[in-house]
Image: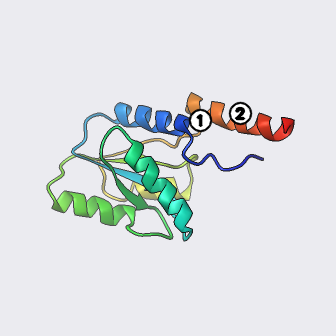
Amino acid sequence: VTPPLGADGRLLEALADRLAAAGPADAVVLAAAGSSDTRSRAEVAAVAAALPVPAVVAYAATAVPTVPDAVAALRAAGARRVVTLAYLLADGRFHRALHAAGADVVTPPLADHPAVAAAVLDLASCRVGG
């Protein structure tokens, strides 16, 4: 119905809110679904770079590093409290898999955040009106 949300600033707002709600962290993993498309992976890296804290990018499927590998590497480096910041819109197989990856906190998917809903509505209205 709409073009991809991409790195819409409202997604960054939602991610920052989710991160703040997760509480303090020694390390953050930005967890995306994964893709074989290099543009998609570059977009995820750009989102990670725009977060208010440093974050390691990892994937639930298809790309590396995987979320479990990223969490394990952060633990090996001394991180005690790891937050997995879900860069996913909805609950499902990928989001459920994040809970088994070893982080202390996994943030909820983004679809119910008001900023994300506003972004989707804006894109849909442009598509219908355009």
Q: Left or right: where does residue 30 sit relative to residue 34?
A: left
Q: Please name whichever residue, 43 or 70, is drawn nearer the observer in this view of the structure.
A: 43
- State the mark number for residue 122: 2
Disc 2 element:
helix
Q: Which residue is mark 1?
A: 116
Residue at screen point 57% across, 30% down: 115
Q: Residue furthest left?
A: 78
Amino acid under label 2?
Asp
Q: How is the image coloured?
A: rainbow
Viewer-closest of 88 and 35: 35
Q: Residue 118 placed where, x, y %?
A: 64, 30
The percent coordinates of residue 109 (x first, y second) are: 51, 43
Q: Please state if 31 lies on the left or on the right of 35 as rendered.
A: left
Q: Residue at x 71, y 49 (%)?
A: 3
Image quadrant where one finds the C terminus: top right
Q: What's the distance in space between the residues labelled 2 and 1, CA to CA?
A: 10 Å
Residue type at numbered disc 1: Val
Label 2 close to label 1 by CB (< 8 Å): no
Q: In the image, what residue occupies the spot 45% across and 48% down?
A: 47
- Which one is earlier in the sequence, the residue at label 2 or at label 1? 1
Of 47 and 104, the residue lying toward us? 47
Q: How many marks?
A: 2
Q: Residues within 10 Å of mark 2 (few under 14, many from 20)?
A: few
For label 1, the crowd category at 10 Å Cα-Cα, with few meaning under 14, some 14 to 19 and many 20 or more, is: many
The image shows residue 73, relative to residue 107, as above or below, that is below
Indicate the position of residue 104 as horizontal and vertical percent values: 29, 47
Left or right of 68, for residue 115 = right
Label 1 sits on a secondary structure element that is: helix
Q: Residue at position x 46%, y 69% from top?
A: 63
Q: Which mark is residue 3?
A: none
Frontmost of labels 2 and 1 is 2
